[in-house]
Image (cartoon, rainbow, N blue to C red):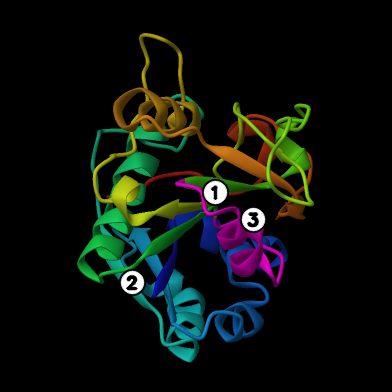
Amino acid sequence: MITIGTTLTTFAMLDPDRDFLWKAWLMHAEEIIASHPEGVTYFAAIEHDARGMEPFYPLTDRLLELGGQWWSFSLDTGRDTVTQANRLKHITMGQNLVSSFATEAGSSHLLHMAADCEPPPDVLPKLLEVQGFCVAAHCTTYCFDHPPIPDAPFDFEIAGPPLTAVCMLIERSVFQRLRWRYDPILGETDDPSYVRDCRELLGHVAVTRRDCVAIHHPEAISSIETRFEGLDLGIQR
C-alpha cells in the first residue's frame, strides 16, 4: 500500500478562486488509485487555528470520497500571520505527521506531495520503476534542470540532487527513520535538509525522473507574502 500525503493550513482553504492551493494534489486521484492495485490511501495533516475544521470541509469531503483520512493539529508559536520566515516549523510538523501516518499504516512507500502541486496520472508506476529510495517527479517551477546521471540503467533520464520534494516517492526504510526539518543556521529549508539527511545518514542519493512531470499551481512562485497577495494569512486565536 502507498500513502499519498500532504500538509496544509487554514489560509489554503479561504479563496474559492484559488482552490488549487488545497486540491491540486488530489487531481487525477481515481486514475492514480487504479494504477496501483496493491492499494493507495490519501492522507492530510491539517493545521487549524481557532476557526477549527469548518474551512477544511471541502477537503475532508473529497478525502471521504476517496476513502482517505486526515489528522488535525494546532501549533501556537505566537505568530499573528503566516510569513515566509515563520512557516517552516509548521510545515515540517505536518510533514512529520504524514510520515507517522504512513509508518503506522504499514505503507511500502509515501508519495510526499505539496497540496498545490498536481501529480501526473501515471506518477506511481513511473516513480516506482526507478526502484530508488527517494525518487522525485520533475517540476519546472523550481528550476532544477541538471544533466542526467550517466549510465543509468533506464530508457528515460534521471538526475541527481538538488531537487524539489513537492512530488517525491519515499521508500519505507527512509520515511520511517528520517524526520522533516530545516536548518536556520545553514539557511537550509525542508527539501534540501531531507535530501541531505537521506544521503549523509542513510547513504541514499535522491534522484529525479525527468519524464515524470508534476505541475505547481501557480507555475511561477515567489515569497509567500507576494505569492498570496490579497489572501487572508492571519492566525485566529
Residue 155, horizontal then vertical, whole percent: 79, 52
Q: Secondary structure at mark 2?
A: strand
| Residues under numbered marks 2 and 1 in contact, where contact means CB atoms less than 8 Å apart | no
10 Å crowding of disc 1: few (<14), some (14-19), many (20+): some
**Quarter of the figure that contains the N terminus:** bottom left
Q: Depth-wise, is mark 2 or mark 1 nearer the camera?
A: 2
The residue identified by callout 2 is 70
Q: In the image, residue 43 lies at what x, y percent?
A: 39, 69
Q: Which residue is mark 3?
A: 117
- For badge 2, the amino acid type reads Trp
Sequence order check, earlier mark of 3 and 2: 2
Q: Assess whether residue 12 is covered by the magenta stretch.
A: no
Q: Label 2 neighbourhood size at 10 Å, few (<14), some (14-19), many (20+)?
A: some
Q: Which residue is mark 1?
A: 232
Q: Which mark is first along the chain, 1 or 2?
A: 2
- Identify the magenta region: 115-133
